[in-house]
Amino acid sequence: MIKRQQIKDLLQSTAFGTEVTVMGWVRTFRNNQFIALNDGSCMSNIQVVIDFNNLPDELLKRITTGAAISATGSLVESLGKGQTVEIKATGVEILGDSDPEKFPLQPKKHSLEFLREIAHLRFRTNTFNAVFKVRHALAFAIHQFYNERGFVYMHTPVITASDAEGAGEMFKVTTLDFDNTPRTEDGKVDFSQDFFARATNLTVSGQLEGELAAMAFGKIYTFGPTFRAENSNTTRHLAEFWMVEPEFAFADLEDNMQLAEDMMKYVIKYALDHCKDELEFLNSRLAEEDKQKPQNERSELTLLEKLDFCLKNDFERLTYTEAIRILKSSKPNQKKQFKYLIDEWGADLQSEHERFLVEKHFKKPVILTDYPADIKSFYMRQNEPDAEGRQTVAAMDILFPGIGEMIGGSQREERLDRLTKRMEELNIPQDELWWYLDTRRFGTAPHAGFGLGFERLVLFVTGMTNIRDVIAFPRFPKNAEF
């Protein structure tokens, strides 16, 4: 195949008069003369100017929106507005036709709802070109951040027999015949005849296995797909999503908070440094959307200002108890504007409470710590009871504007007696987690970790408002298309 040049490189070139070959997809074709061509290397198109008098009509008819073509010609300085270079074509070849009557992406603005229905083609739009370039940069930055700090990347299992979160909302993995399911004498499904000879599920977290590795390597992180069979159709939930989960030994809650804040600032800065064009496009897109909203619903900061603000300000740190005090006396609570009113210590904070703290009260990212033990997982380290005898755990949640909870983590309970007692209270079978308890039996040490919902990070950095628009092929209740 002929060596081709990327449009991204040609748009920055001044090698006028050089013969070049580009290959890409037609965005528009005007006046039988001007082709706007895009090859995915950047959001900008390059203009290919053809001499329609020297091309057969049959070929001209095939240069349609969505068609893949190859164009060869001279790189010249552009006389038109909007671009500095263009290609004066001497030859055009059709690589793949696109029927203009059937191709669903036309040169006009399409709604995000419509684009979700054609998720296999939405990558070809500027919005999704930008979103997924930013997603790539954030993923790369995460690996780079942990690599620079000596963390070992672990691949924890996707298929598991344990429920790390204790929520029970897991997808079952089985090879049993649903029409002829084997049963035990008491009528229950006989999983001993299943592939793994026991009940197994898709993982909701790699944390428990991550802790095992941290007790050997000192510092590890996982970055992989996780699954939750929660029947939720909100703009913040997916059934399949990606999690970043570091675990590190000889660390406490303070170390955990600092690592999380450092990571967030690092990856946001990386995106700002490496996705300038994409973020400027998304910034403009969000500003246009904001204009359609009532004045009181518009953002105080632009997308770029919001990202920059996160870099320049320390995250606010406060305890759950302090947060409850603020929320209880807040205007939305006093005026009964919260859907879930805060009336006592021990309440599980909802998204509306988290966003009030971040967006209205502190107006910056917030780290909440020391939650009531009753609303947190069994593996979180128990604090000494407070002055009123209330039991809290060394947990932390990081809350971000527009998102709510971005990160959840804790110092882990390393004391065997405390951990087993808590498992007994919650009826968690110790024999099923014998391997996890072994880390507390043999060389136990203080350790901590957290989980970052990767799609929520992408949502924040891109300014998109629906989590289904920041993952390539979203999985949610009653939908597994593509």
Image (cartoon, rainbow, N blue to C red):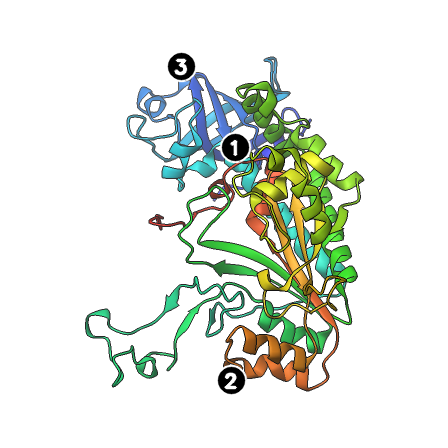
Q: Earlier in the sequence, mark 1 or mark 2?
A: 1
Residue 268, x across and y down, in percent: 70, 43
Mark 1 or 3, closer to the camera = 1
Real-space CA distance between mark 1 and mark 2, rounded to the nearest whole angstrom: 50 Å
Q: Could you say which is closer to the camera, residue 121 or residue 453?
A: 453
Kindly check if marks 1 and 2 are in contact, taking CB atoms under 8 A apart as contact: no
Horizontal arrangement in the rendering, residue 149 relative to residue 408 (left or right): right
Q: Is residue 16 visible?
A: yes
Real-space CA distance between mark 3 and mark 2, rounded to the nearest whole angstrom: 80 Å
Amino acid type for the residue under numbered disc 3? Asn
Look at mark 2 in the image and give the residue it sits on: 431
Name the residue located 68 percent from the left edge and 69 percent from the top edge.
412
Q: Describe the element under mark 2 as helix, strand or loop.
A: helix
Look at mark 3 in the image and give the residue it sits on: 53
Q: Earlier in the sequence, mark 1 or mark 3?
A: 3
Q: Earlier in the sequence, mark 3 or mark 2?
A: 3
Horizontal arrangement in the rendering, residue 265 relative to residue 123 (left or right): right
Mark 3 or 2, closer to the camera = 2
Mark 1 or 2, closer to the camera = 2
Look at mark 1 in the image and give the residue it sits on: 127
